Amino acid sequence: MINRIFSKIMTYDLEKSANDFEQQSLFLVNRYLLFLFLLFLFYSIFIISFFGDVFSSSFLIINTFFWLFLFWIKDKMSRYRKILKGSYIIVFIVLTFIVSFFYIYTWKNAGVEYFYFSLLFAIPFFFNYKEDYYFILLIVVIIAINFIGCLYFELDFLPKSKFIRPNDFKLIQLFNIIFVITTFLIDIYFVSQKDRLIYGLIKQTKLQDSTIEDLLKSNNDLMIQQIVINNLTEDNISEIIGLAESNSPLFLEKFQIYFPEFIPNVLKINSSVVYSELHICALMKLNFDTKKIASCVNSSVRAVESRKYRIRKKLGIASDININNFILKI
């Protein structure tokens, strides 16, 4: 009963933490997508207002619907998780080609190439370097190919703007620089917020691990109490602890009277466990720590740790499992 309750508590806490983190992440993505939608919409209005370039403006406005699409499915992440990740990749690739197009379209004199860096700065927010390594590599390679290709090739098959006059390039370049710096600062802000969520989750996980460790100790104490209540009277408790602390040769004999199945079960796991090791196992069954065991057997702490290590090997106890917890369950 105790173990079932304890297991449910741990499962509930872990699920709650994961759900809270996901909800906060979704809220952050929501704000970022809204920012991108408004940013692109503003840029589109700027182009048509100052230069009358309906073609470019319409092209960018259509692109803003990518952000609206992501905005729509972000609340359905559990259902559209694969679509969401695929949509991010598609949007980054499409934006890369859009930047390349406008770089050529504006005669390579409007500072559009700065937007390649904006795309690179946004990658850490939308992707996880460990989980999405190959996706990130794909996007970076596509951006690099586009940047180098547009820089060294004329690509005359792409149209050139008829709306931009020679005197307009400085204004456009200044606006593009301001636009890129703004997106960079916003990217830094959202990446830092994402990191804050991650570090918060790590801190919460460490706190939960500490709580779980305390609960394990309490659980072990309850198990010992339950065994004592079922098998021993108060006088028996005092007697067996007294025999253990005085290192009496009668201890193990008396111990087997109250725990008749313990030593046979240990020997079932490995029959090569010797008498001195069975003695240590019996003391661990009483929930004695290493220091107290050393005092009971008139030995050093290091010597007891060495014996416990040999017991761990013989019983096949994994290194990540507490040996006392394992012994208590036998």
Image (cartoon, rainbow, N blue to C red):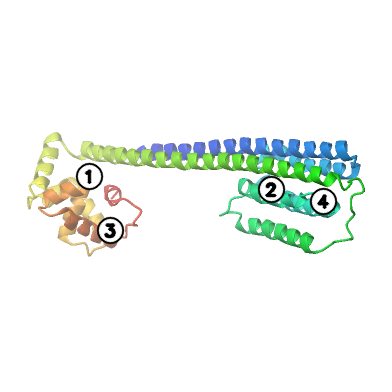
> Label 3: few (<14), some or many (≥20) within 10 Å?
some
Q: Tag on residue 102?
A: 4
Q: Nearer the viewer, residue 139 or 75?
A: 139
The residue where tag 2 is placed is: 118
Give the amino acid at mark 4: Phe
Circle nearer the N terminus (1, 3) = 1
Badge 1 marks a residue whose secondary structure is loop
Give the amino acid at mark 1: Asn
Q: Quadrant of residue 71?
A: top right
The residue where tag 3 is placed is: 312
Q: Looking at the picture, how far across and down is residue 260, in whole percent?
A: 20, 49
CB-based contact (under 8 Å), mark 2 and mark 1? no
Does residue 269 appear anywhere in the picture?
A: no
Circle nearer the N terminus (4, 3) = 4
Compared to residue 222, the image places residue 311 above or below, namely below
CB-based contact (under 8 Å), mark 4 and mark 1? no
Circle nearer the N terminus (3, 2) = 2
Badge 3 marks a residue whose secondary structure is helix
Q: Residue at x 75, y 41 (%)?
A: 69
Compared to residue 77, the image places residue 314 above or below, namely below
Circle nearer the N terminus (4, 1) = 4
The residue where tag 1 is placed is: 287
